[in-house]
Image (tube, rainbow, N blue to C red):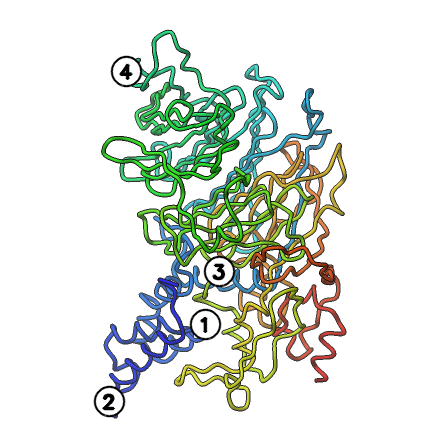
């Protein structure tokens, strides 16, 4: 794929570096331009540290440029937070991203729940638990994380500040009770929520945007001393008559239900896209203290685009910096569309169709999961936006497509074991992986995008002359036939661009199946089944994320078992630069919620490629539950595909005796 390095590119760069060496030169004698090519092709942080220890000049080059090159080459699609005060450096980013990659690939995830102390409020009409919407952020300068959600008509937030190593995090819970403002359950529930970053007088300031069932769109203070205070209200009613195209004075300019909010940051400021049932409204966040904000652009789809009175707009997300919006619709012949700005105004367009994909998975007459729209950025440093969009559909598929033109990136993903389970919410990590959850209980699915990756955690492990273990369950994908790629006595030859047997197979999709985490068994059943309604992460480099379930919130954290391959401080089991070592909580919290660790079970679910007509009987893979930890003294335990707590004793013993 474009922008992703292949083995051929690595070999070419190494050959160029070798050609630059004369008989009397060493590596440290090469010019920086050539050395940076070498550093860009190092496959592990261990190799980078080895180069840095060679001499003073190389140590300085690795410190000043090497770690930056390593991160941007190995994790080119991950959005890296910039620290204005130097709270973290490129070496620390490399340390965290490689640690997290290993945890993700080995399925080292742990979970806890937060549910209200008292019985959650039920809707009088639907008799159902509230369906939370979520957002999260992390400020690298203050080391402060904020997660905020709507619990019915109430807004709840948790601040958590990282402190010096070994010190407990500083935590504050905040609530803005809807009843204190005269809001009524059901009619005034929070339907959409978003954190407005860099808002206010100082660069790290934050505020909260809330859209409600009653049509209210407001900007609330996120500051602890003023939490929930209304800073501004957004409505077309504040516009002049001429500012609303096609609106007559006698017509109402009230907003109806705000279905979604999305914020983008451009050179002209922060732009908010609000989607109601038939209208897209674009607002600018006020920078002058204005308390009443009119839309800078309004597009009434019911008047100008919809072909049917039953068509509804469900969601709008930015694809670029204020110039392209992807739209999820209901009741249209094409339920995925997009809008783009032109010199004459906004233009409403159909998405591109890939003939090969359409042949097997037609988007016509298919229903989309509105909350699932996720832009995908192949290159994080490309600030011009993207045309790649990931979306989930009611037929159980997740579709990656270029909305403007058919492209080789187009792909269709599906749970090979439970292919009809649709995902209400998705969350992407660059082009590395995506996470989904839906209506089939408290389950979290982790998918690999199946692109060539810039970094594999297995590169930092010693060579082996055997296949990865234990054998993965794969319903459709066949084991790879690597033939002549098994080199010598199980060792890699980097000068020839050849990998050993184990390193070659460890990168193959067959040995990296997707996984589903089942959590329902440890959640109390309260007034109906539990479903996943929303997902949020503070950043691409955050080692945790949040899950909105019926009547509560879950927090997921990357947490490996302690093993001899741990390279962080004292074999830490939390990210040393962005993690919270004391994230596990038990008992009542200040915000009226009770924290409880969750038991989970893991099932590996195949390579994730959607197969048309996947209706034949498939033998269910074994359900893995945390239990036996393989001790450090057992050889090769660190080479196991999965985290030690998920090892099956007999598989480890069989491999050790092989």
Which residue is at the front of the view, 507 or 143? 507
Indicate the secondary structure of the residue bearing disc 2: loop
How far is mark 3 from mark 1, CA to CA?
Answer: 13 Å
**Residue 624 visible here:** no
Q: Nearer the viewer, mark 3 or mark 4?
A: 4
Give the alpha-carbon distance from disc 2 to disc 4, as whole Å.
74 Å
Q: Is residue 648 left or right of residue 77?
A: right
Please rate how many residues cluster around mark 1, counting C-alpha atoms within 10 Å: few if below 14, some from 14 to 19, many from 20: some
Res 367 quadrant in image: top right
Tell me if residue 400 comes above or below residue 115 in the rendering: below
Give the CA separation, mark 2 to mark 1.
27 Å
Q: Residue furthest bottom?
A: 23
Residue 44 marker: 1
* Residue under pointer 3: 96
Q: Residue at x 42, y 48 (%)?
A: 353
Q: Earlier in the sequence, mark 3 or mark 1?
A: 1
Which residue is identified by label 4?
242
Residue denoted by label 2: 22
């Amino acid at each position: 794929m474009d922008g992703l390095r292949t083995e051929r590119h690595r070999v070419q760069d190494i050959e160029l570096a070798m050609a630059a060496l004369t008989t009397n030169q060493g590596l440290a004698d090469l010019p920086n331009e050539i050395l940076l090519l070498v550093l860009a092709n190092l496959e592990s942080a261990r190799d980078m540290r080895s180069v840095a220890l060679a001499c003073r000049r190389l140590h300085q080059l690795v410190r000043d440029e090497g770690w930056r090159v390593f991160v941007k080459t190995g994790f080119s699609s991950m959005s890296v937070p910039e620290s204005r005060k130097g709270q973290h450096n490129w070496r620390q980013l490399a340390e965290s991203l490689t640690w997290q990659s290993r945890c993700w690939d080995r399925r080292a995830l742990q979970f806890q729940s937060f549910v209200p102390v008292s019985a959650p409020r039920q809707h009088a009409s639907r008799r159902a638990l509230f369906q939370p919407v979520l957002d999260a952020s992390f400020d690298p300068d203050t080391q402060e994380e904020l997660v905020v959600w709507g619990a019915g008509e109430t807004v709840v937030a948790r601040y958590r500040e990282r402190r010096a190593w070994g010190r407990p995090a500083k935590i504050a819970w905040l609530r803005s009770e809807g009843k204190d403002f005269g809001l009524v359950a059901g009619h005034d529930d929070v339907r959409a929520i978003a954190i407005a970053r860099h808002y206010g007088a100082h660069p790290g300031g934050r505020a909260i945007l809330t859209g409600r069932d009653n049509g209210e769109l407001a900007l609330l203070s996120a500051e602890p001393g003023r939490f929930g205070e209304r800073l501004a209200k957004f409505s077309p009613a504040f516009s002049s008559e001429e500012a609303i195209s096609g609106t007559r004075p006698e017509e109402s300019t009230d907003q109806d239900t705000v279905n979604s909010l999305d914020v983008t940051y451009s050179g002209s400021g922060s732009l908010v896209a609000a989607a109601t049932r038939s209208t897209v409204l674009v607002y600018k966040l006020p920078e002058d203290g204005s308390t009443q904000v009119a839309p800078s652009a309004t597009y009434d789809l019911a008047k100008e685009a919809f072909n049917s009175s039953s068509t509804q707009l469900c969601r709008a997300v930015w694809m670029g910096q204020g110039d392209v919006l992807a739209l999820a619709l209901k009741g249209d012949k094409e339920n995925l569309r997009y809008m783009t700005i032109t010199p004459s105004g906004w233009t409403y367009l159909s998405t591109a169709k890939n003939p090969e994909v359409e042949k097997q998975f037609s988007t016509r007459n298919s229903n989309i999961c509105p909350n699932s729209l996720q832009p995908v950025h192949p290159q994080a440093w490309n600030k011009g936006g993207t045309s790649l969009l990931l979306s989930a559909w009611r037929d159980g598929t997740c579709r990656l497509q270029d909305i403007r033109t058919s492209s080789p990136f187009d792909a269709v993903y599906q749970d090979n074991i439970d292919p009809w389970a649709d995902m209400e919410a998705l969350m992407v990590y660059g082009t590395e992986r995506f996470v989904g959850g839906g209506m089939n209980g408290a389950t979290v699915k982790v998918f690999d995008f199946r692109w060539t990756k810039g970094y594999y955690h297995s590169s930092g492990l010693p060579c082996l002359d055997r296949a990865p273990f234990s054998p993965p369950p794969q319903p459709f994908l066949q084991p790879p036939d690597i033939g002549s790629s098994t080199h010598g006595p199980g060792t890699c030859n980097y000068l020839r661009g050849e990998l050993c047997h184990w390193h070659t197979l460890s990168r193959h999709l067959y040995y990296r199946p997707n996984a589903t985490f089942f959590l329902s068994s440890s959640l109390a059943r309260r007034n109906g089944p539990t479903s996943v309604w929303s997902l949020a992460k503070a950043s691409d480099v955050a080692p945790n994320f949040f899950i909105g379930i019926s009547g509560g919130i879950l927090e997921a954290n990357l947490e490996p078992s302690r093993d001899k391959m741990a390279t962080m401080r004292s074999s830490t089991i939390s990210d040393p630069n962005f993690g919270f070592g004391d994230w596990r909580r038990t008992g009542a919290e200040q915000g009226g919620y009770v924290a409880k660790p969750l038991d989970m079970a893991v099932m590996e679910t195949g390579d994730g490629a959607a197969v048309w007509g996947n209706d034949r009987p498939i033998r269910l893979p074994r359900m893995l539950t945390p239990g036996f930890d393989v001790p450090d003294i057992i050889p090769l335990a660190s080479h196991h595909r999965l985290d030690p707590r998920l090892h099956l004793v007999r598989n480890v013993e069989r491999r050790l005796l092989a």
